[in-house]
Amino acid sequence: EAGVAQSPRYKIIEKRQSVAFWCNPISGHATLYWYQQILGQGPKLLIQFQNNGVVDDSQLPKDRFSAERLKGVDSTLKIQPAKLEDSAVYLCASSLDSPYLRAGKEHYEQYFGPGTRLTVT
Amino acid sequence: AQSVTQLGSHVSVSEGALVLLRCNYSSSVPPYLFWYVQYPNQGLQLLLKYTSAATLVKGINGFEAEFKKSETSFHLTKPSAHMSDAAEYFCAVRAGGGADGLTFGKGTHLIIQP
């Protein structure tokens, strides 16, 4: 079974430029997450999708970050304009879905991709 | 809101010695707790999870963790460290309600001395 795919693996941009990251989840996984991992810290959830709908984007800096999952499969995370503090690894994860999950009665494992390392100069 | 505290940003043990990585949590609801491992330039891999069944949870690679509600802890242990265990370890708690994104601790870097 293929894992979560992310591209690019590395990206270097100057501040105020824009950048986009792409994620393709494991086939059949309805739930998709984007996490930001700053050096020396644990990952922080940015946004969670259920199919093509947003479940949680409370920690997404919406003035500069946007994400979409138009067809409920792959997803794109965009930063515009980038700041120095956006330098981080951006991790995508996916998991199965069920009504029990949405009722908080079950948890399926989140499978993580290798991440995209962003450097803003 | 849920949170996780990992005590010790770096832990060093000798090969063959006991590994103990500490994690304390705060949660307003019965928690789901996880330990993940991250090798350099790789994504996160689930080691084990606690989902309100047995309080002693066994995971992959010989790791286990014990959920102690009275201490709000979920420490990770392994009886005998191996060189291949050197990595970054993260404790995480799941958000409540319909969202199940994870809240991670800051991580503990495990160093194995030969």
Image (tube, rainbow, N blue to C red):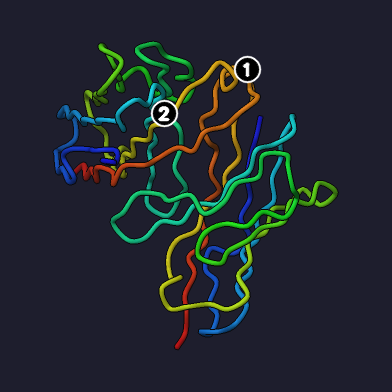
Discs 1/2, front = 1
- The amino acid type found where label 2 is placed reads Leu
Q: Judge left or right: residue A87 versus residue B113.
A: left
Q: Which chain does the residue under circle 2 lie in?
A: A
* Quadrant in the rendering for residue A95: top left
Q: Which mark is residue B29?
A: none
The answer for how far apart the CA atoms under marks 1 and 2 are is 21 Å
Residue A7 location in percent, x, y? 18, 38
Q: Label 1, on which residue?
A: A103
Residue at 71% of width from left, 40% of height from top?
Answer: B26
Q: Residue at x 22, y 25 (%)?
A: A81
Query: Mark 1 Cα within 10 Å, few/some/many (few <14, many 20+)?
Result: few
Secondary structure at numbered mark 1 = loop
Q: For this view, does A49 lie left or right of residue B36?
A: left
Do callouts 1 and 2 mark residues in contact (Cβ within 8 Å)?
A: no
| Residue under the point 21% across and 31% down | A21
Residue type, numbered disc 1: Ala
Quadrant (top left/top right/bottom left/bottom right) for the C terminus of chain A: top left
Q: Which residue is mark 2?
A: A46
- Occupied quadrant, residue B98: top right
SS type, badge 2: strand
